[in-house]
Amino acid sequence: MFFTNFVISLLLPTFTIIVILLIKKIFQKQLSAKWHYNLWFLLLFALAIPFLPEELLPFDGHFIALDSIESNENRYTIDSGEVEGERENWMKDFSVSVNRSSPDFLINFFVSLWMAGMLFMGILTIKSWYKLKTIKKTTQLIQNKELLLLFEQCKQQLKLTKPFTFNVSVRESPVIKSPLAFGLFKPYIVLPTNLDQWLTTEEIKYILLHELHHLKNKDVLTNYFVIIFQILYWYHPLVWFSLREMRLDREIACDTAVLNSMGGDCAVDYGNTILNFAGKTSKLKNLALANHLNGSKKHIKKRIINIAGFTQESKLLKLKSILIFLMVGIILSCQLPFVSAMASGNDQYKFNHERVTYEDLSTYFKDDEGSFVLYDAQADSYRIYNKNQSTLRVSPNSTYKIYSALFGMEANTITSENSTIKWDGENYPFDSWNRDHNLYTAMANSVNWYFQELDKSMSLDKIQENLKGIHYGNYDVSAGKERYWMESSLKISPVEQVQLLKAFYFNEFGFEEKNVQAVKDSLRIKELDDFHLSGKTGTGMVNGENINGWFIGYVENGANIYFFATNIQNDTDVSGSKAADITLSILNDKGIFKDE
């Protein structure tokens, strides 16, 4: 997921920035200064998307829901000959290790690099905060009553009430040479000491109006978001460029707002006031958390050009600006379904059902991370342990063989009457694999080569089509026929396992009934009076370590049927047999299956 989110964090902002820059270029004269600035808020939204929880995204990456249930009365006839002799193997872990060049080192390297960059940027931000704190300590109340009166007049002119401005305080400091505005909950406007000695009252009024416009527009709060995104996207040069342009557009928007409130006749005087601060810097530089009246020479030049060309904004220009903003918003929103699909990565299933009870079964799982899902067909209700893990998709391993067998029978590669496949003579790691097998013995001994032979009779596209047809997890077979279901590309969640078992049991997908029945027969494990247990284990082994254990199946308990799926995860020492032990303990304690 790290690389997926990293790709999203590269592509989404890049596309957004390109669109915004093109629109600003094409409609430069049709956008007011305020809306030139407002366009950048679309970028801030785009920057936030990769870090939003998936459930907050406006589109789901997956749209499958399998909550319907049909009533059916199926009875089984079990081949009591060869199958009985193989049933004792169902709890054994017949798993082959997948040798994987683990990307963990690479992932950890990039995560560490990203975090190191954020840490460095965070330190710079803390340093900036400390500088502001230092400035705040040097400030003192302004004693000039005329200046204080002017400040109150400016607030009244902008119709700012005390609750709205959080009682903004205007102060002065000897360590700065350019006005600053900062403070999220208690805002400050800080002026250079003795500013009234080298600026006229009217020029000071321009400065105060400019800084008050920043506070009125909540630019201090916006600045905090900008800083956060600079930290998160420290590696993205386009983001840095765009956020710098956003700051410039913010200053231009404030300049224009001041001129609109004062009238265009004062543009020359206002421009000269800005130029008075050109080249003047505070003793404490890089105050990223503050709004500066001053800026780089390049930015000052652009602001002066804008001031020189100022004209009063018309209502038509404002209307055009709003329409252009909405148009850009619509264009950029077209990315959201794609981003949602990528963000989900199909690793988390979207599960919705009216009757779900979440239970604490952690004592059964001990130190293993896992989930248990139980569906009561009669009550049409779920009981689930570990909500998040129950919808997390992982490799199905040998539990997939249920559907591999069904697809093979549908393709007539094997039939219910003749399901034997000859052993190719290769020496496999388990003695029970080294002989001919039919569906029943292959399922009981979890014979990998048998089900791989079934896949060989179909193209990879056909296999994927079959998986899509039954909504099997992420139906990703990109890893190839030999291994897609063994700790590789194909993934499914416990909830989906249960839903598919129900659909399989009632044949909701319209397969040949005799084929469904044959697979059911191969899954039968135990029959005890009115309790009939059917299921399949699965173990995922990577580089010699058992990391993934499954047990899925169903219990026919009198007139009712219970479908279940248990999955356990760990770095080592988990298996299908361990998942089966956990499952049987839970089912026994719930009175669903008494193994006596």
Image (cartoon, rainbow, N blue to C red):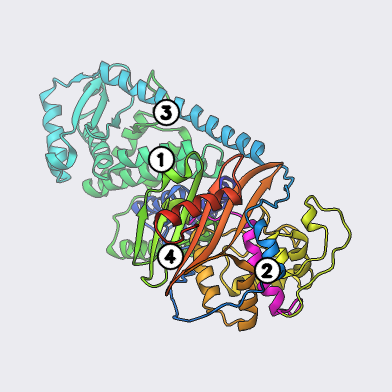
Q: Residue at x 52, y 37 (%)?
A: 234
Residue 152: which quarter of the image? top left
Query: Label 1 near label 4: C-beta < 8 Å?
Result: no
State whether residue 5 appears in this view: no
Quarter of the image holding residue 424?
bottom right
Q: Nearer the viewer, mark 3 or mark 2?
A: 2
Q: Position of residue 431 (x, y in %)?
A: 80, 53
> What is the three-letter code of the residue carrying label 1?
Val
The Cα atoms of the two marked residues, 3 and 1, are separated by 11 Å
Q: Which residue is mark 2?
A: 404
Check disc 3 and report the residue beneath it: 125
Q: In terms of secondary structure, where does tag 1 sit?
A: helix
Q: In the rendering, which numbered label is found on residue 375?
A: 4
Q: Viewer-nearest of labels 2 and 1?
A: 2
Residue 482 x %, y %: 76, 59
- Mark before the other along the chain sequence, 2 or 4: 4
- In terms of image quadrants, where is residue 75? bottom right
* Alpha carbon separation for disc pair 4 and 1: 48 Å
